[in-house]
Image: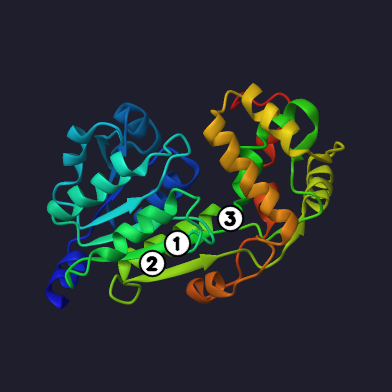
Amino acid sequence: MENVYARAVSSPSVFVTGSLGNVGREVVRALLARGVQVRAGDRDPARVEALFGSAVDAARFDFRDRATFASMKSCSGLFLLRPPAIADVKTTLLPLVDEARRLGVAHIVFLSVAGAQTNRLVPHHAVEKHLARDTDPGRGWTVLRPGFFAQNLGDAYLRDIVEDDRIYVPAGRGRAAFVDVRDVAEVAALAFASPQEHDRRGYTLTGHEAVAFAEVASLLTEVLGRPIRYEAASIAGYLRHLRRRNLSWTQAAVQAVLHVGLRFGQAERIDPTLERLLGRSSRSLRTYIEDHRALWGRSSETR
């Protein structure tokens, strides 16, 4: 095992899936900051090149096209995430893991979700189980289980904030220990830099404070300089809302389950693991909002 990992560290090359998404692009940046060679996969490599230039090796990759899995060849690491649009991991992510192993990928870092190790209802559970079944001593993995992303404000909640000046989710008075994707990306880079140290470990990653959505709305109001309100949605109302946003019923149901869980404290627990791994304080929700305030400007051309 030592020889495999020594080779992985001495000549690192990590294949990053979802390299244009919120998480993937930050993982690419975190790896590049450590001097790691990156092959960034996407269905449109030209967009990858436009974002990162010559800093990465852009490759065509599609979770639903197994012919593109060969793009991982010669890579020692794989950063794996599950796109929201993919619910069937048995025909996508699991074969991808198997092909990665066949091609000699030594370490896989999988972006899961908090609680997935015991929650069979989320697709991430099956991927975690599949990784754990591989007992080959020369092949390792690390599972990252973040809680609610601060970046949801600039993604899933973006249109509601910009168009309606509201956050609309069925979370009741629940609180969430929002975690910044940039911090999660740094942990992923750490796992690739020291794979032996993080081998076969699962990390729950949260921010250092649990915040209610009414407080989130107040923070947005303060930073943006216009009133933003939190409107607690009903489950039925939220499902209708997401369907009008063109999410599939499966996607809408997953989002509803995740947010309803907040009512029962499923995302309010603060875990010290992130700060322990980083050796510093995690980024606050206020920091994320201040760093990205242009996202919610009404004249923004990024929407």
Which amino acid is tagged 3? Answer: Asp
Cα distance between the residues tagged 3 and 1: 13 Å
Residue 30 coordinates in the image, percent (x, y): 41, 56
Task: Specify whether 63 is left or right of 271.
Answer: left
**Res 175 seen here:** no
Q: Residue at x 25, y 51 (%)?
A: 97
* Furthest residue in direction right, as rendered: 227
The residue identified by callout 1 is 144
Q: Nearer the viewer, residue 122 or 290?
A: 122
Of callouts 3 and 1, the N-terminal one = 1
Of callouts 1 and 2, the N-terminal one = 1
Q: Is residue 261 above or below residue 10?
A: above
Q: Nearer the viewer, mark 1 or mark 2?
A: 1
Residue 240 coordinates in the image, percent (x, y): 69, 27
Which amino acid is tagged 2? Answer: Leu
Mark sitting on residue 75? none
